[in-house]
Image (cartoon, rainbow, N blue to C red):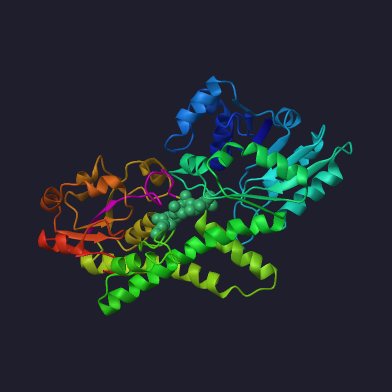
Amino acid sequence: MNICIIGTGYVGLVTGACFADFGVNVVCVDKDAEKIHTLNRGEIPIYEPGLKEIVDKNVKERRLAFTTDIGDGIRRSLAVLIAVGTPPRGDGSTDLSYIEEVSRTIAANLNGYKVVVTKSTVPVGTGRFIEKIIAEERKETHLFDVASNPEFLREGSAVEDFMRPNRVVIGARSGQAVAILKDLHAPLYLIETPFVITDIETAELIKYASNAFLATKISFINEIANLCEKTGADVHVVARAMGLDRRIGPKFLHPGPGYGGSCLPKDTTALLNIAKNAGYDFKIMEAVIEVNRRQRGRMMEKIRKAAGKLRGATIGVWGLTFKPNTDDIRESPAIDIINGLVGEGAKIKAYDPAGMKNAASVLPDTVVYSQDPYEAASGSDCLVIATEWNLFRQIDMERVKGLLKHPRVVDLRNVYDPEVMGKRGFEYTGVGR
Ligand code: UGA
């Protein structure tokens, strides 16, 4: 089968490379010539473990190609997957202008039956919107179907998530579209992946409901953590015991500075907006977003309290990305917290294994970037752990104690054990313990 993926960002690139690895002929197209040029030079524009190997292999075996020629990509493909950006607008709605533009291009290049699939996270009703544009603008009356096939990839483990998904969701109105999409995912049948076949609107909503529920779990455990701090309970033991109930499950019950990244914040806001437009007052979603916002403020209070005074103090910060194993700093709690600290007159010495280049483009120029975690701790009045990179678990904390001006650690990800840290002579603050 020949397929074309429009948009070679994070989702498009991972999806394209993985489908090629399934044995499909994939052409990834993007209007950004620089990006296509980079990919054709064998370089990967994003940080994603395992992606380069799979791209290299499939390019070499001639199943994966990159081009800016969108029309040609569409014309030679049976399935056209849309993976362009759907950024939020200021008012909480979703900007569908790229989707609209791509739909027009598909209409102009329709030269036979095709199934047009949305991979991007799109508001409920977008499938119909695409259908309408293509039906109105196609030059000849070639048949086509629109389908929704949302992705559930996590940054940092996207290749693994693609190859071993918990489920595949296919939303379509025609049996032919479902059959083609099933065929595309054929290798996943061998590992008995559950398939959910449904209508387009339901598939579109599944994506938002899934991300919103994950966000709800995080905000919920953060509220429990805050309550633990007031009552003397330990949130880790609470979360572990809760998670042992199979109806609840152990994942996404780790307390911290709140969720970040390019998906959970955007999708929760978008879902609230979808509900508003549908005339539904979605109370839980509102609270989840508000709790997440407030959690950043609570982290600031912890640092203020630990550091004594922020004006003139030097704060070492370990971790800048929104989570480990990525260089992505979008909506990262660490970035908000550093901006807050700088705003209150603190000097920052930061270290992150992958995110420093991206962080430097958004943080104030006064932030100093260190070679390693020890350098960031050296001479600091207080050390803040903002992202739980594994590297930060393998640190010589005796050495860190000697380097800090005061042995104060504010651990926003509960990387360390409060008791052990106390015994080592640290003034230690965690979350909910
Ligand atoms: C998320 C979803 O997990 C994916 O299933 C989905 O496909 C993706 O969004 C998307 O829509 O494309 P991702 O943004 O890569 O994936 O990150 P997550 O691993 O979900 O983490 C999000 C945030 O929640 C991070 O800031 C993380 O630190 C935080 N988190 C996660 C917690 O604070 N506690 C937890 O227990 C888990």
The relative height of residue 104 versus residue 309 in the rendered view (above or below) is above
The relative height of residue 88 versus residue 68 in the rendered view (above or below) is below
Residue that appears at 72% across and 55% down? 199
Q: Quadrant of the C terminus?
A: bottom left
Residue that appears at 40% across and 67% down? 245
Residue extending furthest toward the bottom: 231
Residue 218: x %, y % from top left: 43, 64
**Magenta stretch holds residue 327:** yes
Q: Is residue 142 visible?
A: yes
Residue that appears at 56% across and 75% down? 283
Label tally: 0
Figure quadrant of residue 416? bottom left
Residue that appears at 70% across and 32% down? 70
Pick the residue in front: 286 or 77: 77
Residue 91: x %, y % from top left: 62, 63
Figure quadrant of residue 19? top right
Which stretch appears magenta?
A: 313-329
Left or right position of 88 against 334? right
Residue 379: x %, y % from top left: 16, 51
Figure quadrant of residue 384? bottom left
Left or right position of 320 against 2? left
Q: Is residue 102 visible?
A: no
Prevailing secondary structure of the magenta residues: loop
Pick the residue in front: 413 or 400: 413
Left or right position of 374 against 425? right
Residue 311: x %, y % from top left: 25, 63
**Magenta stretch holds residue 411:** no
